[in-house]
Image: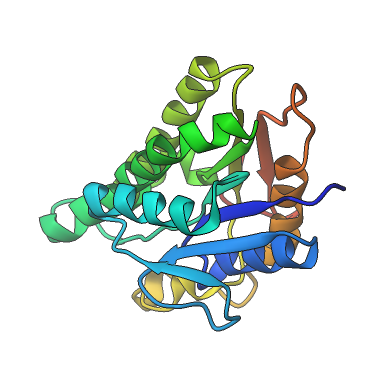
Amino acid sequence: MTDPGTVLITGGSSGLGAAVAEAVANAGGTPVVLDLKAPDAGHAFVEVDLADPTAAQSAVARAIDEHGGLDGVVTAAGIDRCGRIVDVEWAEWERVVAVNLLGTAAVVRAALPSLEERHGTVVTVSSTLGVKAVSDASAYCASKFGVVGFTRAIAAEWAGKVGVTLLVPGGMWTHFFDDRPEQYKPGPDAQLNDPAQTAEAVLFALTRPPGSEVRELLVAASGESSYP
């Protein structure tokens, strides 16, 4: 496996993003985290609220300027608000879509010219709920279905210039579920994946040579209940 180079990671202070940052660092690369709070691991960091597309693009520009360019981008940031659409406050519903979909698009848009210069790779992070919808998750499903369509379109648009991988992860043991009502938390018998295992798959996609791409990856625990 080759050195992944300088990799921008949204949501890199926790969960899958933190696991990806650690995998990149362990492989000899330089992780650059975009998040609301600095990563505990001490990686390079740009503070940004990804719900603001203009701020997201500015943060990418700052990261490129500070590090001389990008070899990879991983859009691991994601939030959720569970409940029936009529019960979830509209501002919260809208923020889920803003962070998960618009934030992804804004970051990728700003990074593409630098990635093209280095024949780099972008890995977007959808979800098994980006290919299978469930009740009480309309904002999350809408945003993650959107990431699937966005990524496939970008793959066609930038073919031969930038590598594009769509990651579809199943549930993982992270703090993602911490602030949910009990009814929406994984049960004691839930089978979830170790985020470090999913991060290894991301690292594989980031280190493919130019002209060879992993277009789509579905990584889940063998007993994943949300897919297929």
- Observer-nearest of 138 and 176: 176
Label count reads 0
Q: Residue furthest bottom?
A: 40
* Residue 141 spot, x, y in % from top left: 38, 44
Quadrant for residue 25, please give it: bottom right
Residue 202 locus on image (x, y percent): 69, 49
Quarter occupied by residue 192:
bottom right
The percent position of residue 133, horizontal first and vertical second, equals 42, 40
> In which quadrant is the C terminus drawn?
top right
Which residue does the image show at 45% across and 40% down from the upper left?
Answer: 111
Q: Residue at x 34, y 41 (%)?
A: 106
Closest to the observer, 45 or 175: 45
Q: Is residue 130 above or below residue 158?
A: below
Q: In the figure, is residue 201 to the left or right of 37? A: right
What residue appears at the point 63 percent right and 65 percent down from the top-left corner? 21
On screen, residue 164 above or below 161: below
